[in-house]
Amino acid sequence: MFKNVTLYRLQPGWAPTIDEMEAALDAARFSPCGATQDKSFGWIEPRGQAHGPLVESVNGQRILRFMIETKAVPGAVVRKKAQEAADHIEATTGRKPGKKETKALREDALLALLPQAFARQSQVWVWIDLENGWLVTDAGSQGKNDEIISALVRAFDGLALALLNTAMTPQTAMTQWLMAESSDEWPQGISVERECELKSHDEEKSVVKFTRHHLLTDEVRKHITEGKLPSRLALSWEGRIGFVMTESMQLKKVSFLEGVFDDRPAGSDEDPFDTDVALSTGELRQMIPALIEALGGELSPDTVTAASQSAAANAAPGSRPVGSGTVTVGKAAVPEAATADDTPPF
């Protein structure tokens, strides 16, 4: 169910009922793109049942599903159609369209071609754990995360989110784990697997990727001592969940390992949706605190604010403090956007 995990901290006090959430999301149900519409998004039924509820609760965990539909026309096709219109104008009037008119011709060409374009749909799971104060999205890129957070802010009054901050940055932790002489130095329950990406921050921006490669080696340590720091690292937790952690603490390529779903009741009449949600969220609810502890524990909002103010005070003129922060959008505080990343981890 969850292939990616981006974790947000819900600010205390937000605890709507299921009915309140249902009413809020119903006003933003998904409807497909119109003939001349290039993008549409909204909320759909998590179980996939038409006209069903938009909020599902399984073992106290609330599950939502967000749909994004886009229609794209190749730029070359749009330019060709616009050029044909421009050539016709020049042939019939003797004048060549100017820049403003050429732009309008391209817009008209796009509108004319959109009804013929194929629609592409992508769905993103959203998991709300009110007990732990988390909101988790399954989005694989920052762009999709931004769209989902904006949609949630518009739907729910009083919703405020902040990026979860840890005492140690993911990059610092990944560096320590790769520099370890043996696996005994890794945090309890966390294991380094066989993929990573190292990047330098000099002018050359060098990148080294290791795939299906043992990582506790002098070769990897040499790259790190030369200034190439980990931006992605494959990890596993207790041999039950595998994932790739990024320097912004996004978890990608999340997979539940062999044996995790053995507890699924065989031949049961129970809806597999309920079982999948219960098992996947149950495992993640154990893994996420272990990962946070491996990163030195979560910083309180007051600590984060003080650290940000201190960094800003000590920063050189014109520079910007490094680290995660929050920015207010509408009624909610949401993470400061990282660089959009729609590419696969490896």
Image: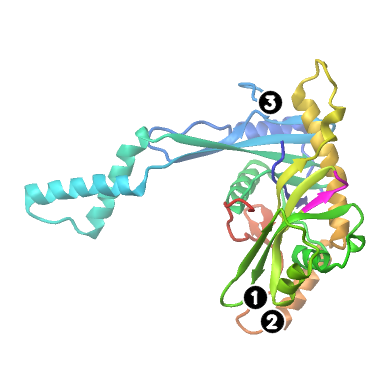
The residue that appears at 84% across and 63% down in the rendered structure is 299
Type of the residue with mark 1 = Arg
Colouring of the image? rainbow
Who is closer to the viewer here, 310 or 49?
49
The amino acid type, in three-letter code, at marker 2 is Ala
Q: Which residue is mark 3?
A: 47
Q: CA distance from mark 1 to mark 3?
A: 44 Å
Q: Secondary structure at mark 2?
A: loop
Among the 4 quarters of the image, the one containing residue 265: top right
| Residue range of the region highlighted in magenta in the rendering | 235-239
Q: Which residue is mark 2?
A: 315
- The residue at the point 77 percent across, 62 percent down is 170
Left or right: 189, with 241 as reference point = right
**Residue type (three-letter) at the residue carrying disc 3:** Arg
- Whether residue 171 is visible, yes or no, is yes
| Mark 1 in CB contact with mark 2 (< 8 angstroms) | yes
Q: Main secondary structure of the magenta part?
A: strand
Q: Nearer the viewer, mark 2 or mark 3?
A: 3
The N terminus is located in which quarter? top right
Q: Which circle's residue, 2 or 3, is located before the other in the chain?
A: 3
Marks 2 and 3, how far apart in space? 50 Å
For the residues bearing labels 1 and 3, Cβ distance under 8 angstroms: no
Q: In the picture provided, is 52 more to the left or to the right than 38?
A: right
- Could you classify mark 1 by the number of other residues whose Cα lies within 10 Å: few (under 14), some (14-19), or many (20 or more)? few
Query: Residue 169 in the image: x percent, y percent?
Result: 77, 65
* Side of 228 relative to 339 (left or right): right
Residue in the picture at 86% in, 45% down: 239
Mark 1 — residue? 320
Where residue 132 sits in the image (x, y, percent)? 85, 46
SS state under label 1 = loop
How many neighbours does mark 2 have within 10 angstroms: few (below 14), some (14-19), or many (20 or more)? few
Where is 74 relative to 57, above or below?
below
